[in-house]
Image: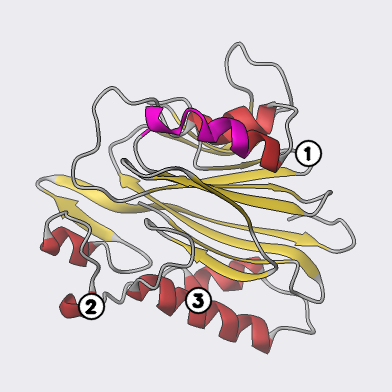
Amino acid sequence: MCIAAWTWQAHPAYGLLLLFNRDEYHSRPTRPAQWWAAAGEEGEEILGGRDELGGGTWLGCTKGGKLAFLTNVREPSPRDGARSRGELPVRYLQGRQGPLEYATEIAKEADQYNGFNLVLADVHSGTMVYISNKPGDAPVVQTVSPGCHVLSNAAIDSPWPKVLRLGQSFNRFLAAHDDAEVSLKQMVEELMTDTVKADRSAVPDTGVDPDWEYQLSSIFIDTKKGQARYGTRSMAAIGVKLDGEIR
C-alpha cells in the first residue's frame, strides 16, 4: 500500500528529502533499484525498482532531475482489467512534459485506473504536483506547497494514525538536524522501520476488513493475508541538496 514522507523547498540544505516504504506481496516478482528503460520507449533511463508483473515502478527518478512516486488509494473492490498504475510514473519520467502538463493529461484518463496517488516533481524547475483519482469522483490535481508532507493510501496529508505518527517523527528528526548533514540511512532506520500499529478504534474505515485495516496501520508492515506474506518490501531515501548534489 506504501507510505511516503518528504520535505519540499523547506530545509536549509535540501530542496527535497524523501522517504518511501513500498508495501506489496512478497511473492510479487520485483527487481531492485537500478537503471532501466521501458521496452519500446524512448527517453531517459529510470533509476528505481521495477515491478516485473506490471512493468512499471512505484518510485523513480532520472539524471535530468525528474522524480515520480506512487501509492494506491485503498478501496474494498478494485476493478479487474484496469490499467497498471505502475505505468504512470514511467510515462512521466520518460516523457518530455513537465509535472503540471503531465498531470493534466493523466486527469483525462484517470478513470482507466484503480485508485492512485501520484506525485510528480522536477527538481531543477522547483515544481511538484500531486494528482489523485478515486472511483466516482473527479480527479484532483494540485501543486504541492513547500513544507513537510506525508502520503499513504488516502489523499495527501490525510490524518490517518500512521500518517500523523510519521509526520511527527519526521518533523522532529528535521528539527534536530536543521543545520547539519542529514544521514539518509539514519532517517530510514529511525523513521521507516516503525512497526507500532494504531489503536483499533482509530484505524480508518475504507470499506476493507477491519482486521486487515489494523494490520496495515503501522509504518513498516509485515503480515499475512491467508498464507501469503504481505508487507514492506523496500525502503528508499532520496536527498537533493541545494547545491545540486543528489543521493
Q: In this view, does 24 lie above or below 176?
A: above
Other residues around mark 1 within 10 Å, as few (<14) / some (14–19) / many (≥20):
few
* Residue 147 horizontal/vertical position (percent): 66, 72
Residue 108 in the magenta stretch? The answer is yes
Mark 1 lies on residue: 63
Quick one: SS at disc 1?
A: loop
Q: Can you see residue 139?
A: yes
Residue drawn at (51%, 57%) of the image: 20
Quarter of the image where the C terminus is located: bottom right
Residue farthest along the top direction in this orientation = 40
Task: Depth check: give the residue in front, 152 or 240.
Answer: 152
Mark 3 lies on residue: 167
* Residue 140 horizontal/vertical position (percent): 50, 48
**Residue type highlighted by circle 3:** Gly
Choose mark 1 or mark 2, whichever is in front. 2
Q: Earlier in the sequence, mark 1 or mark 3?
A: 1
Q: Do the residues labelled 1 and 3 touch (CB within 8 Å)?
A: no
Measure the C-alpha gap from mark 1 to mark 2.
42 Å
Residue drawn at (72%, 38%) of the image: 62
Main SS category, magenta section: helix
Residue 133 picture quarter:
top left
Quick one: SS at disc 2?
A: helix
Task: Depth check: give the residue in front, 242 or 79.
Answer: 79
Mark 2 lies on residue: 202
Residue drawn at (22%, 58%) of the image: 206
Quick one: SS at disc 3?
A: helix
The magenta region covers 103-113
Measure the C-alpha gap from mark 3 to mark 2.
17 Å
Q: Can you see residue 35?
A: no
Q: Earlier in the sequence, mark 3 or mark 2?
A: 3
